[in-house]
Amino acid sequence: MNNFEYMNPTKILFGKNQIENISKEMPNKAKVLLLYGGGSIKKNGIYEKVIAALEGFEVVEFGGIPANPEYAVLMEALTIIKEQNITFLLAVGGGSVIDGTKFLSSAALFKGDTPWDILTQNIRTSKGMPFGTVLTLPATGSEMNSGAVITRAETKEKLGMGGPGLFPQFSVLDPTVIQSIPKRQLANGITDAFTHVLEQYMTYPIDARLQDRIAEGILQTLIEIAPTIIKDPTDYKAASDFMWSCTMALNGLIQKGVPTDWSIHAIGHELTALYGIDHARTLAVILPSHYQYNFEAKKEKLAQYAERVWNITEGTLDQKAKAAIVKTEMFFNELGIDTKLSDYTNDYMGTAQEIVRRFTARGWNGLGEHKNLTPSDVEKIVTMSY
Amino acid sequence: MNNFEYMNPTKILFGKNQIENISKEMPNKAKVLLLYGGGSIKKNGIYEKVIAALEGFEVVEFGGIPANPEYAVLMEALTIIKEQNITFLLAVGGGSVIDGTKFLSSAALFKGDTPWDILTQNIRTSKGMPFGTVLTLPATGSEMNSGAVITRAETKEKLGMGGPGLFPQFSVLDPTVIQSIPKRQLANGITDAFTHVLEQYMTYPIDARLQDRIAEGILQTLIEIAPTIIKDPTDYKAASDFMWSCTMALNGLIQKGVPTDWSIHAIGHELTALYGIDHARTLAVILPSHYQYNFEAKKEKLAQYAERVWNITEGTLDQKAKAAIVKTEMFFNELGIDTKLSDYTNDYMGTAQEIVRRFTARGWNGLGEHKNLTPSDVEKIVTMSY
């Protein structure tokens, strides 16, 4: 096991009706900016519950944060924060709204020239404006971590940011919110969380036995509850397991002390930036090619995953490892998630070269758990995914 | 899954040489009380490392906190805290030193008549004097939770306390400390952590799939590393898995959203108070009788544990469940831990009645995940353990 530091101060309020308790977690006399997305919270009753829970606080609203939170939109919210002397941010939404809120938390206190520097110059945020979240879409894990990904349409860029000052003070996880989420987004959420775990697990053996077991436990749980979630999102038991698994998949715990990969995300982000493909679906496109291409480096963990998660006990190590890739792709397909780039766009020729060009323009750092993937490797992986 | 709240703000510094980094985690100009136990830290080099790391801080020392931290001894430390205007406590030791430090953290700011009231009146501590820990003996999990157990020899009592103000600010987990721990204490540590997990897991099914998987993962890890730890505690990989498993066993995570039992600890504490038997060994004495006596209530989870942790796939549910109890007792025995009260004292007659008398005198609340165990049940469980 590698040395590590771990701290996660976010308070989780999990379960039915926990929205009622948010005012106890907020600073007295906070002036609140309530942030949300396209307005689904006004249809499913969550907006009313939040407003009721905020009684006694001065509340300003900012709706319309899009999926892949857009820099230009967030800059409008930043203006409101400054003009209205906001002191607390409350994100009510999925990963995009929460990520956008993290950007605002950082930007509100940022002293530099332009907040876009936070993203392009990898500036870590040690202190942000305090914020809480009410999660409406389990998937990204943003509700219990300190990272965010922000998109800028103008430059077709999608970049990450983070820092210890960007943990939510609290996050409400009420599994009943799942009832009103479209099947497409539920499938995306399962795929996203599943891939989060694999990015932190599918590397090489390092004898971090407990981290492996917890990662495998999240994968097993997602596999077990996926059919129920898609068929009947009102099943509260399955919804609870789904919601908690998504949070645990990316709250920092399973990555501590182990190598991590994150190539699939790095490449996938470019597919979203280029074609607007749903984040989770870009992961499902890249994952099989990435694991096939890097088979030798990953086959020991692939075989362990095959045995423990998919109960594949027959065959050689190589056979098990290969079967695990097939099983994973089938799992995505059964959720209704296509796994080839050509399923999403006819305009895919040249994508591999364009992604390499973008990576190289930003300075090539190498990808993967060994940081040894070259531009040529990435070009081949993306080409295999066509 | 039940509703829950979860927050754990303790910062973990895990790995070799992390002691060097403690000063970064401490308030500037803190006046530190360094607390430790019987002095083993002066033989194994940890004391020197801590003193070196504290350069620049004013440090007062208080050694001699005994196993089962004794109220009378801690009251001496409290006098020093007040007389010397201490502002930060640093526990260097195992669960006893850390628990004692938590008591002092609470008592230092306590406004009531006598600090013993914190224990007898179940007063929750919302704010204590800040403290950190350097763990020297993996076992209790106290390094990443907010609970403590304090003993008072005068009255032969052993009582619990806790509250959100009693999380360590930081804890150093350096697996190399295991090298100098006697085998007896390593066996105790494994048994203690193992039983912590079972107290939070061995109840009844509630469809908290991920909590179950994580609990099972800790148990599997402890079973896998136990022989290596006892044979060669210099094995850093096994030591790392051991240390992290002990912390994760009782940092609050696996108990969230699920019923918990804790009868084994409640009864075991009395055996320590009465006979001075090592805490972990009292758990190993009570666990098999408790699970046999409450077999019907627990058999579904016992069978799940049999299958997933011990790979017992043959037989009926009842047969698997029974085999799991046998396997658990054998696991303790293989660690050199005896599992009958008569292995520890010849004076065991009447123990069951005395424990019931003590529980009843404190007000009977019922024990177990259903709070339905009666004095007569406890009497039978303890008698079965003779």
Image (cartoon, coloured by chain):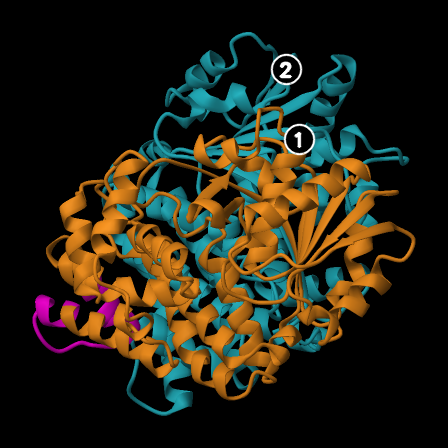
Chain colours: A orange, B cyan
Q: Which of the two residues, A276 or B99, is positioned nearer the viewer here?
A: A276
Q: Which mark is residue B377?
A: none
- Amino acid residing under circle 1: Leu
- The N terminus of chain B: image quadrant: bottom right
Gap between marks 2 and 1 measured at Cα:
24 Å
Q: Residue B316: image x %, image y %?
A: 37, 92
Q: Which of the two residues, B66 or B33, is positioned nearer the viewer here?
A: B33
The answer, for residue B366, to whether it is visible in the render is: yes
Q: Are marks 2 and 1 in contact (CB under 8 Å)?
A: no
Q: Comparing marks 2 and 1, which lies closer to the viewer? A: 1
A50 displayed left or right of A208? right
- Give the residue drawn at x 86%, y 35%: B114
- Amino acid residing under circle 2: Asn
Q: Residue A215: image x %, image y %?
A: 37, 60
- The residue pinned by badge 2 equals B28
Magenta part mainly helix, strand or loop? Answer: helix
Identify the image quadrant of residue A383: bottom left
Q: Which of the two residues, A306 or A160, is positioned nearer the viewer here?
A: A160
Q: Residue B305: image x %, image y %?
A: 41, 74
Identify the image quadrant of residue B95: top right
Identify the element where label 2 is drawn: loop
Chain hosting mark 1:
A
Give the crowd class for mark 2: few <14, some 14-19, many >=20 residues within 10 Å: few
Q: Is residue A207 magenta?
A: no
Q: Which mark is residue A109?
A: 1
Give the crowd class for mark 1: few <14, some 14-19, many >=20 residues within 10 Å: some
Magenta stretch in the rendered image? A300-321
A320 displayed left or right of B261? left
The answer, for residue A300, to whether it is visible in the render is: no
